């Protein structure tokens, strides 16, 4: 199975009630790829500046992430800085410096064009569509988006939505996009816009899957060690797609289980800054926590 | 099993994106009692004014709710008015007229003093303790509270907390009470203040149970017919306590299942104004939805 992610690679500076970290490895593609790598090989396409250290590239390569789609160009890598409030669920962006990511024009290495599972991490819908133009025959395409593009690239986003199988977005974004009243309503409206399934991410409150025949709500795994929620959404998507890439079909029970794997994978990510917690664990830790999660939900 | 609830009975005027209702039957004890009555008999203690129609009393009596603790005094019944925003999860109170509830001094009929299961619905901690002084040997005491008492009756609330087995409160209240960072942390801090278990209600996001040995998060049942969330928290507590009152013990799995029954019971309540939806259903409907909920969570 060949899973590809296209998205941002960044240096993050984060302050949370639990501490702070400066200029640590982050970005949507980074978190997604690392999370998905627990389930199988991943191909990454992104862009970094000349300040990106070889050690970060190696960190990902060690994890079965094919970095041959990583473009290095003159300039500085994308930088993001933010602060989380006491409840860890509200964050304020302090600064965004797109740097080399501003002109990101993803070019898939020829060997990546046969990718069967495609995750278009948060980015401009026009750029996301450029990726789709380069994959020959994907089996499952899932895209993320954010408020900025809902407001400023609305027409392109609607075009993109007709070309994807699944969409992942957070609850406020779903309300913005659909003007719905209630999350189930929001999900149903997204389905009328193209995707066959939608996953609504609710941060510490878990996630919801909506398909034409199923409505599934799952709680977040209640870890008591929340250090930094940055990258939780992308780690969730990575766990979900990583699991799906090992499956023969994407029926209701499979999608539901993928949602659960995404949830459990993301719960590790929030336990430390950057990829620190992921670096400490193996697939066996994910499976052990998955069993705990199953037991908690066996009512 | 003898389950008693002491709390408010009110006329509510509610406006939601789905419509409006004026001067309809509401109040914490009302919602709790009706929800619990699906599981067994309930005793209600509360106060109403002379404007309270006999038909409302009969509506509850018909449901196996013993209304002999309902005091009727000169004056008007408690009135509350509020409006819900588009996402149905944020509400603004327009007016509160405590009326006869301002001087509520609960007196338990002698036949109620042997109640084994006690739910102290939202009210002043001093009044809640007066109820405890009147029950002889309860097996399980659970109390709800709210922001007003956390701020204005803090010392009494801390006293009350030492005398109860379980506490039910919503997430913002838990943060207010504990100054915690994260819900698990908040729950753990509540446990240090007295209760043996705490249930954190998160509205459309479900609920969390925290005991010294268990952390359980469950999602809300995702109904796509959200008309009026008023009373959801009390209906949740009613379903939970109603189920517990049928159980021989309150171990981890029993509490978890009680949380699930509370969740499912509350999901009906939000599907219409006042008690309208509850009046249409039977215990069989709750059990059928419970099975759906189990299936959704079987990952």
Image (cartoon, coloured by chain):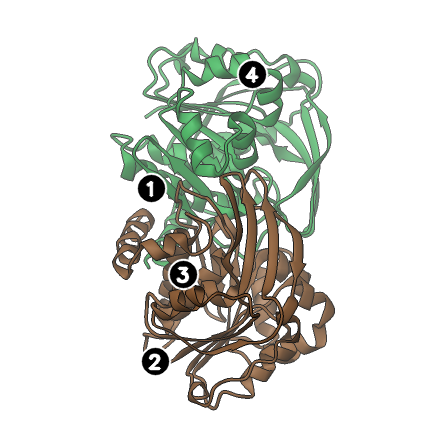
Chain colours: A brown, B green
State the residue position of label 2: A1
Crowd around label 4: few <14 · some 14–19 · many ≥20 (10 Å): some
> Could you tell me how far apart the alpha carbons at marks 4 and 2 are, in whole angstroms?
59 Å
| Pointers 4 and 2 in contact (C-beta within 8 Å) | no
Task: State which quarter of the image contains the N terminus of chain B.
Answer: top left
State the residue position of label 1: B257
Q: Nearer the viewer, residue A226 or B164?
A: A226
State the residue position of label 3: A262
Crowd around label 1: few <14 · some 14–19 · many ≥20 (10 Å): some
Total number of numbered labels? 4
Question: Which chain's residue wears label 1?
Answer: B
Marks 1 and 2 share the same chain: no
User: Which percent across, then down, holds residue A261?
Assistant: 36, 61
Question: Which chain's residue wears label 4?
Answer: B
To which quarter of the image does residue B39 belong? Answer: top left
Question: Which chain's residue wears label 3?
Answer: A
Q: Nearer the viewer, mark 1 or mark 2?
A: 2
To which quarter of the image does residue B151 belong? Answer: top right
Q: Nearer the viewer, mark 1 or mark 3?
A: 3
State the residue position of label 4: B154
State the residue at coordinates (46%, 15%). B160
Tell whether A143 sits left or right of A149.
left
Tell whether A59 sits left or right of A106.
left
User: Which percent across, then down, holds residue A275?
Assistant: 42, 56
């Amino acid at each position: 199975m060949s899973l590809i992610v296209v998205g941002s690679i960044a240096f993050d500076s984060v302050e949370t009630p639990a501490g702070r970290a400066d200029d640590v490895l982050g970005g949507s593609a980074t978190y997604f790829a690392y999370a998905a790598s627990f389930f199988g090989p991943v191909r990454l396409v992104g862009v970094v500046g000349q300040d990106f250290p070889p050690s970060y590239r190696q960190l990902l390569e060690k994890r079965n992430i094919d970095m041959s789609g990583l473009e290095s160009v003159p300039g500085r890598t994308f930088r993001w800085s933010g602060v989380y409030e006491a409840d860890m669920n509200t964050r304020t962006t302090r600064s965004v410096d797109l740097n080399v990511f501003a002109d990101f024009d993803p070019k898939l290495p020829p060997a990546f064009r046969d990718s069967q599972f495609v995750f278009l991490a948060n980015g401009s819908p026009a750029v996301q569509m450029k990726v789709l133009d380069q994959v020959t025959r994907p089996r499952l395409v899932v895209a993320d988006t954010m408020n900025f593009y809902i407001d400023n690239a609305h027409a392109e986003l609607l075009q993109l939505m007709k070309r994807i199988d699944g969409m992942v977005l957070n609850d406020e974004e779903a309300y913005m996009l659909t003007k719905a009243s209630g999350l189930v309503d929001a999900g149903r409206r997204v389905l009328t816009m193209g995707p066959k399934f939608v996953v609504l991410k609710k941060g510490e409150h878990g996630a919801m899957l909506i398909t034409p025949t199923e409505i599934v709500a799952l709680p977040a795994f209640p870890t008591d060690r929340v250090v930094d929620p940055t990258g939780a959404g992308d780690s969730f998507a990575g766990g979900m797609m990583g699991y799906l890439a090992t499956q023969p079909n994407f029926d209701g029970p499979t999608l539901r289980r993928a949602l659960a794997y995404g949830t459990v994978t993301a719960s590790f990510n929030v336990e430390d800054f950057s990829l620190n917690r992921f670096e400490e664990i193996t697939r066996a830790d994910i499976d052990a926590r998955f069993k705990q999660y199953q037991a908690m939900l066996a009512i």
